[in-house]
Image (tube, coloured by chain):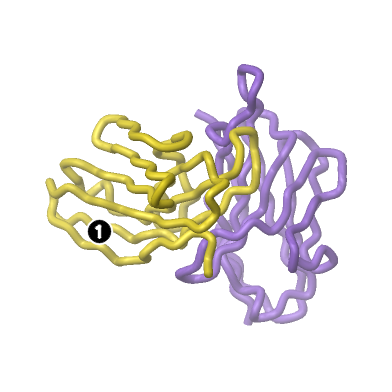
Amino acid sequence: GAVVSQHPSRVICKSGTSVKIECRSLDFQATTMFWYRQFPKQSLMLMATSNEGSKATYEQGVEKDKFLINHASLTLSTLTVTSAHPEDSSFYICSAKRAGQGRFATNEKLFFGSGTQLSVL
Amino acid sequence: QKEVEQDPGPLSVPEGAIVSLNCTYSNSAFQYFMWYRQYSRKGPELLMYTYSSGNKEDGRFTAQVDKSSKYISLFIRDSQPSDSATYLCAMTLSGGYNKLIFGAGTRLAVHP
């Protein structure tokens, strides 16, 4: 089955530092990856859509200068939380879209990483 | 009003029980409906994927969509302790990737 690896699984950092989270598709190519954020007892919320070789598309209300996304290859996307603050503490999770076999690439071909729990002190 | 409402639970049932999980939504344009299972500190995994109204069955799982009521359900028969997880509903406007809107998730505990 398709595997998406996300690293690190947990990070604790001091306020003001930057944190990089990696998302890798291990056995398939992912032209598109997605980054979500989940606060306790709340829904997964899409932050941005990352396309290989182009700039990410950010959802309304998400600061692109704070959440830097780089999708440099077909198997790797990174999210960097710059100058993290306690309010950035959350569960961050990526997903990768695998191209479908037929004419349509459906949501059945979307695979999630294991998530990163970020705690900013 | 949230686009997708889901009771966060927790829901605790004995092994072998039939579990009913539900979501309501406000956007009548949603056409594709999904249920994901998420174990603690893991990413969601797709359980069921349905289009428009109707039922879909896969083993012990049955997904129902009632678009007229804007209500979707996931039934788990003969529940097992290994079913203990958080169940997320999600929906989108079209089949090709479009923005997934998630419910908050219902935490289920199946005790022996």
Amino acid type at circle 1 is Ala
What's the residue at 19%, 45% (across, down)?
Answer: B79
Q: Nearer the viewer, residue B87 or A115?
A: B87
What's the residue at 72%, 65% (across, down)?
Answer: A19
Task: Classify residue B47 by image quadrant.
Answer: top left
Q: How many marks?
A: 1
What's the residue at 73%, 56% (across, down)?
Answer: A79
Figure check: A112 above or below A89? above
- Name the residue furthest top: A102
Q: What tint does the image give chain A?
A: purple
Figure check: B8 above or below A49? below
Q: What tint does the image give chain B?
A: yellow
Q: Taking A114 as reference, is B88 left or right?
A: left
Task: Classify residue B64 by image quadrant.
Answer: top left
Figure check: A61 above or below B89? below
Q: Taking A48 as reference, is B3 left or right?
A: left
Chain under callout 1: B
Where residue A75 appears, as percent x and y from the top left, is 71, 36
Q: Nearer the viewer, residue B96 or A52?
A: B96
Disc 1: which residue:
B109
Q: Nearer the viewer, residue A26 or B82?
A: B82
Where residue B56 appears, as percent x and y from the top left, is 34, 32
What's the residue at 34%, 54% (across, down)?
Answer: B22
Where residue B41 appears, as percent x and y from the top left, is 46, 57
How crowded pointer 1 is (Cα within 10 Å; few <14, some 14-19, many 20+) is rated as many
Q: Taking B38 as reference, is A113 left or right?
A: right
Q: Label 1: state its secondary structure.
A: strand
Where residue A23 appears, as percent x and y from the top left, is 66, 47
Q: Nearer the viewer, residue A37 or B92?
A: B92
